[in-house]
Image (tube, rainbow, N blue to C red):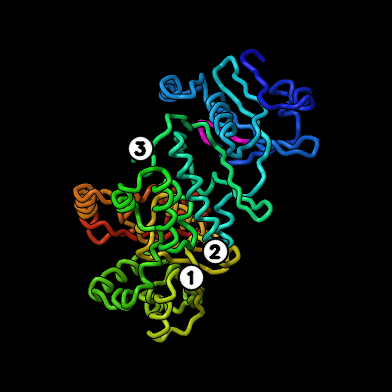
Amino acid sequence: MSGNYEFVCADDAERARFADRDAILAHPHELAAQQNRARSVVRIRADGRVYYMKQFGPCSIRNRITFAMTRPHAKDDAERECLVTLALRQRGVETPRPVLRGRMSDGRSFYLCEQMPGTPLVEHLLRCEHDPTMLRMLASFCGDLLAAGFRLPDLSADHVFVRQELGYWRFGLLDLHNGEVAAEGPAPLKTCRRALRRFQRSVQSLPIARHAALRFALRLLKRAGAARHARTIVRGLSPMDTAARYERTGKAKAYKDRNPARTERELALLASVWPGRPGETVLDAPCGAGRLSPFLRARGHGIGRVDGAFAMLQQAMDGGATEPMAQAHALALPFVDRAFDGAVQFRFLHHLEPSAQKAAVQEACRVSRRFFVASFFHPCSVHHASRRLRDLASGRAPMRHAITLSRLVRWCKANGFSLHAHRAELPYCKDLWVASFVRRSDA
């Protein structure tokens, strides 16, 4: 192999074992992360140890300029990741141990590191291990890194690793090729805002209480030296949990009683695309205050319900609902694959950012045997354009997130479903659309 090849923190056995790139890939390996155009990650097992090799495509012009103008200076993505890792380790931050890096003659580069102890923070939170002490220490850890000059665009619950050692919480970091090491001092607002947004997106599917998220954000900003701008930064973030707002006194009741004329119009729209058959079971997720129940009962469906807000489920029960229901997040449904004949997500997706929208659709498709129905806000509409102008004028983060029909079709196709029908009340004027999908084997 021509190009550049350098061992970093390798022992003698690793130098012999990984003499070149072909020798690395000669060991048992498997894809460890979803591949994209810029990089791929494989997990390698050798002599009882686990390693990860990141393979990057030729360095983009944008990255070459960034790596030349910011520290640590590097010629490619692998070298940048290695140098940022070494800078963090010098400061005492736990990272995957860098073993080697290399660059090939065609401009591609690769980086090999040993597996880091601990588990991703997102897994702790998924198990509802919301230890206040751990979250407080983590916020300080992240804020201190930002104040120390480390600019880590990929800082999130996916890339922070957590473990306990002698009763003390320890944190580590990975995925550092986009990192930068700048001068110490208060972190720029852009850096703080980006870090919090990444954390927010990485836990969007988890039942994180609003007060816990707010405490985490404020502590991180304080340690990063941006406390006096905390109100501005937090105000620009999207809500952490769409369900939590309905737990406030009277909020769920007000939602149930609002605008019955609009509900009637929307149910007529839903009826025009409905693919369900009498006797089939349907999961209403999230069910809200039960507005779809009469619609589903009238069509002879057995109904299952979930919602993230207990207050919403209480409103559904007060309305006379007797069907099974559970408090659960629509992005983590507590059901086996194909547990229902169909699933419906109505007036829900627009509350989520695109990555969470995709996860919600995937979950609904997973638990559906035959069909899936969803409403969504279309971006090409007068209504959506006016809403975005108001957001821009106020400086707030968008509260409603639109997607195109073609994107929703792609997500459903990836999960085995084809478009059945779609409708809009006033296409390109109002933004609410509905679409139904059927599993391709049943189309």
- On the question of residue 378 being in view, the answer is no
In magenta, the rendered stretch is 36-41
Residue 431: % across, % down = 26, 56
Residue 330: % across, % down = 47, 64
> Which residue lies at the image location 69% right of the left edge and 53% below the top edge?
166
Where residue 130 sits, quadrant-wise, is bottom right
Instruction: Indicate the amino acid at tag 3.
Output: Pro
| Mark 1 neighbour density, 10 Å: few (under 14) some (14–19) many (20 or more) | many
Does 40 appear in magenta?
yes
Label 2 secondary element: loop
Q: CA distance from mark 2 to mark 3?
A: 44 Å
Residue 181: % across, % down = 47, 29
Q: Nearer the viewer, mark 2 or mark 3?
A: 3
Residue under label 1: 283
Does 73 appear in magenta?
no
The answer to whether 64 is drawn above or below residue 115 in the figure is: above
> Seen in the image, is 372 located left or right of residue 163?
left
Which one is nearer the viewer's eye here, 321 or 138?
138
Instruction: Indicate the amino acid at tag 1.
Output: Leu
Residue under label 3: 188
> Which residue lies at the image location 35% right of the left edge and 69% below the top edge?
271
The answer to whether 247 is drawn above or below residue 273 in the figure is: below
Residue under label 2: 367
Earlier in the chain: of badge 2 and badge 1, it is 1
Q: Are marks 2 and 3 in contact (CB under 8 Å)?
A: no
Q: CA distance from mark 2 to mark 1?
A: 9 Å
> Which residue lies at the image location 22% right of the left edge and 47% below the top edge?
392
Instruction: Indicate the amino acid at tag 2.
Output: Val
> Seen in the image, is 283 located left or right of residue 266?
right
